[in-house]
Amino acid sequence: FFLEIMAHETDFFDFFKAIEENQPKVAQLLYRKFNAKNGKEKKKREAEQLEGKKITSPISLQWNVFNEENLAVAITRQESLLFQKITPLELLSWNTKEKKNCVAVHKCVGFSNAIADWVTSEMVRRVKLEERVILLEKFINLGENLLSLKNFSSCMSVIGALGSTAIFRMKKTWDKLNAEAMSAFQRMKNILSRRSSYATYRAFLQGSTPPCLPYLGVCLSDLTFIDDGNKDENDNLFHLKKWQMFASAIDDFTAIQRPSFVSLYRPQGDVLAAFQSYEFLTEDQKHVYSQMVEPKDSEAATQKMLAQYEEQKQKIIELEARIEEMKREEEKEKEKEKKEKE
């Protein structure tokens, strides 16, 4: 398996030496593209990481408090810091047995999932229809702000969450949404659509001037496609062509990484700390909450609630009876100990 070369630096550089004997210029090109960043870039990156750590207080995630524009900046700054830590080695290792060691990639994926989980959890927690409509509009506005920052990654998380079963099934909520917000939602959905291998999104990304944050899922899928679509053969020229394809993909990725959002926008609050203290709902809970706050059949939902109430009531009665039994057993033990002492 050709990518396993990357799991061992010695083998990796031996591979370059083998190419260098026949194709010295190509070897130099590949080495430059896969080598670590030079000292100047490293110092700049370290300074940006320190700048990002100056944030002290968590930003508010409360549904009726958070400001869409400020939150979009906070999310983008934080994700930019995580995104810049992804190395070429991690990208190339993602489709190998070394995937578990791709710490920076896992952190980026986890952050994106946290955004989507927060959006869904907040929406299904709103019992009042008018509150759900207000929040839906705010989330769409948040997506627009993220898109204007060229943060395709987080915009994908927000729009993906709004299109999830738990939220998209809320017909009454969507029916109350104003036409302008619905149009904005559909526009973002079209831009980030999976159709034709994300063709529209790729065009937007290609036409965007960095800094921007790409959808990491597409980047990883492209590298996996290169790997799976070009099976290894005992042919040095074939190996070289495959590495050139990897080099081109990695070069595009690192070109997007270099400019940073950190120096462009003032801190708006620590969104990572806010997510760490947030109570996310599980997938099952999201579904249950969604069915409760906006049932498809009100009569059936009421019957279900009454049945659950009776079930819980019976459990409480049984628990109280068990507590009384335990008290009686404890009293018997005390009486027994008292008699033994006498």
Image: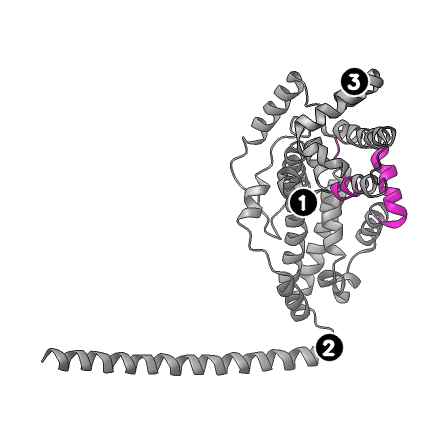
Which numbered disc, 1 or 3, marks the residue closer to the eye? 3
Which quadrant does the C terminus fall into? Answer: bottom left
Tag 1 secondary structure? helix
Residue picked out by circle 1? 109
Q: Residues within 10 Å of mark 2 (few under 14, many from 20)?
A: few
Instruction: Give the image location of residue 319, x and y in percent.
Output: 42, 79
Residue 21 or residue 337, whichever sits in front: 21
Seen as rendered, the residue at the extreme left is: 342
| Residue at x-position 65% and y-position 16% | 40
Give whichever of discs 2 and 1 has the lower sequence position: 1
Q: Amino acid at mark 3?
A: Gln
Tag 2 secondary structure? loop
Residue 138 or residue 316, whichever sits in front: 316
Asked if residue 218 is among those painted magenta in the image, a careful observer would answer yes
Residue 305 or residue 89, whichever sits in front: 89
Q: Residues within 10 Å of mark 3 (few under 14, many from 20)?
A: some
Q: Amino acid at mark 1?
A: Val
Work out whether 56 lies above or below 322: above
Which quadrant does the N terminus fall into? Answer: top right
What whole-number distance in Å separates the C-alpha atoms at marks 1 and 3?
A: 33 Å
Residue picked out by circle 3? 28
What whole-number distance in Å separates the C-alpha atoms at marks 2 and 1?
A: 36 Å
Magenta segment range?
193-221
Instruction: Give the image location of residue 338, x and y in percent.
Output: 15, 79
Instruction: Tell whether 60 sits left or right of 133.
Output: left
Residue 126 visible here: no
The tally of labels here is 3
- Quick check: marks 3 and 2 in contact, CB under 8 Å? no
Instruction: Give the image location of residue 256, x and y in percent.
Output: 76, 30
Instruction: Give the image location of residue 229, x and y in percent.
Output: 85, 42
What whole-number distance in Å separates the C-alpha atoms at marks 3 and 2?
A: 67 Å
Instruction: Tell whether 31 sits left or right of 331.
Output: right
